[in-house]
Image (cartoon, rainbow, N blue to C red):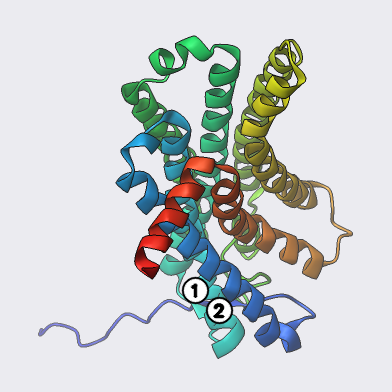
Amino acid sequence: MGPSNKSQPSPVPFLLVGIPGLEHLHVWIGIPFCSMYVVAVVGNVTILAVVRAERSLHEPMCLFLCMLSATDLVLSTATLPRMLCLFWLGARAIALDACLAQMFFIHSFTALESGFLLAMAVDRYVAICHPLRHTTVLTPARIALLGVVVVVRGVAFFSPHPVLLKQLPYCGPRIIAHTYCEFMAVVKLACVDTGATKRYSLSVASVIGSCDGFFIAVSYVFILRAVFRLPSREASLKALGTCGSHVCVILVFYSTAVFTFLTHRFGHSVPPRIHILIANMYLLVPPFLNPIVYGIRTKKIRDHVFSSLRVKAT
């Protein structure tokens, strides 16, 4: 018999809803989202270019900031372009493999963001509590090792997510009540018991988030204790000023992350549109805010950007 001419049917795609109840405002919601994405890309690329070009910025805090900027670029690019296609073009369909790839990048790079914020907190602790040992403790080799550990942790813990969901059977309408392929929104569509899968995801997210948050809090307890022991008020304010931008970024990232996690775990009465809007802020605001906060508050970066703009203007 000759080879069969029958082709395998293409998998049924998932359909993204967007923000339930606010579908009529999708076009308008997309405008500030797009603006935030443009600022995030330009700002984070600028930080990477400035630190790469200026050798005096090759210090631990700026190197960790570059890792954070690269993470922000991937995280925002994994969500915003596809989200804008949904808002402006009505492109709701997304293939299973594309959905799982987006999910992997979102969850793993969120873990990377948390890890790099912890690494930056460690840098501030060493710089303020042990200033004479700062360069000997955080050597380039140790900075690179910390970066590798953070990346491996994020990839290792969240690689099972797409693998587990790939094996699940899906029946009925494949409608994802979200603006992107979020794990909990997709796993609800499976027509088998997914209790163990949900517990694994929530456990991993809670362990990583709580451990990073705990060690960041501990580092700042030691930092504050060291700052208040400084002999002059001016020295105390200067030391606190070096931590101000980092604290702002931490508060924005963890406040939205905790709200999203608690909503999944306990907040079943929270309206879906509120949950989804906060979940979007959780992914969009930190990449948008980080380069602004660090660019304004980090004098070396700010001065180098302004000097570059003056040279180009002349």
Q: Residue furthest front?
A: 314
Q: Is 94 or 25 nearer to us in this picture? A: 25
Distance Cα–Cα, label 1 vs label 2: 5 Å
Residue 274 percent coordinates (x, y): 81, 65
Question: In terms of image quadrants, where is residue 21?
Answer: bottom right
Q: Is residue 56 above or below residue 83?
A: above
Q: How many marks?
A: 2
- Say which element carries label 1: helix
Question: In terms of image quadrants, where is residue 18?
Answer: bottom right
Q: Quadrant location of the C terminus?
A: bottom left
Amino acid residing under circle 2: Leu
- Say which element carries label 2: helix
Residue 139 percent coordinates (x, y): 36, 20
Residue 81, label in figure: 1
Q: Is residue 45 above or below residue 210?
A: below
Q: Are marks 1 and 2 in contact (CB under 8 Å)?
A: yes
Residue 99 percent coordinates (x, y): 48, 66
Q: Is residue 15 above or below residue 291?
A: below
Q: Is 77 or 41 nearer to us in this picture? A: 41
Q: Is residue 167 visible?
A: no
Amino acid residing under circle 1: Pro
Q: Is 114 or 155 nearer to us in this picture? A: 114
Q: Residue at x 54, y 66 (%)?
A: 39
Q: Residue at x 32, y 80 (%)?
A: 8
Q: Residue at x 31, y 38 (%)?
A: 55
| Label 1 Cα crowd, 10 Å radius (few <14 / some 14-19 / many 20+) | some
Q: Residue furthest left?
A: 2
| Label 2 Cα crowd, 10 Å radius (few <14 / some 14-19 / many 20+) | many
Q: Is residue 230 above or below residue 9?
A: above
Residue 290 percent coordinates (x, y): 58, 51
Q: Is residue 46 visible?
A: yes
Q: Badge 2 is on which residue? A: 84
